[in-house]
Image (spheres, rainbow, N blue to C red):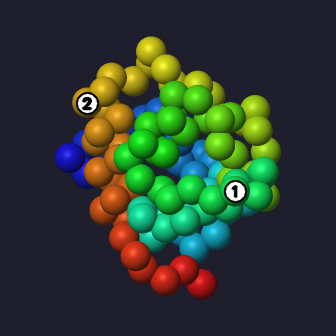
Amino acid sequence: DAEKGRRLVQSQGCMTCHTTARKSTMAPTWRALWGEPVTLKDGSTVVVDEAYVRESIYDPNAKVVKGYSAGVMLNYKGMLSEDAIKSIIEYIKALGEGEKKE
């Protein structure tokens, strides 16, 4: 559930770089991110969904968001269970779907 996901991202240190504020300088904000298209460093776009979030947790350099650096985020493959990943996804979903960002 979302609350479990919130606790996980805090305990894993994710909130050191990610934020729920409107803007973030270290890593993409999670505020109103769910279901939104994001532009990647290579110029392509991807919609933030379960597959994208899961891939970003397991292989953070696979699709780096434009304006951010590769090689910063840890690879959590083997460190987080599938249940933990699902809870993190629910937390990100709970932060807003389809809201307009400023």
Tell me, for residue 80, which label it has, or none.
none
Q: Which residue lies furthest to the left in this view?
A: 1
**Residue under the image location 65 percent in, 43 percent down:** 63
Task: Give left or right: position of 86 versus 63.
Answer: left
Give amino acid for label 1. Ser
Can residue 6 be seen? no
Could you say which is closer to the camera, residue 63 or residue 28?
63
Q: In which quarter of the image is residue 102?
A: bottom right
**Residue under the image location 69 percent in, 46 percent down:** 64
**Residue under the image location 63 percent in, 59 percent down:** 45
SS class, disc 1: loop
44 vs 1: above or below: below
Task: Give left or right: position of 27 versus 51.
Answer: right
Q: Residue furthest top?
A: 78
11 vs 18: above or below: above
Residue 27 locus on image (x, y percent): 66, 52
Q: In which quarter of the image is residue 35?
A: bottom left
Task: Give left or right: position of 3 versus 44.
Answer: left
- Image depth: mark 2 or mark 1 in front: 1
Can residue 84 be seen? yes
SS class, disc 2: helix
91 vs 23: above or below: above
Q: Mark 1 points at which residue?
A: 44
Q: Name the residue under label 2.
A: 83
Q: Give the alpha-carbon distance from disc 2 to disc 1, as whole Å.
A: 30 Å
Give amino acid for label 2. Asp
Residue 85 locus on image (x, y percent): 35, 35
Residue 52 locus on image (x, y percent): 49, 45
Classed neighbour count for the residue bearing mark 2: other residues with Cα under 10 Å, few (<14), some (14–19), many (≥20): few
Q: Which of marks 2 and 1 is nearer the N terminus?
A: 1
Residue 3 locus on image (x, y percent): 25, 50
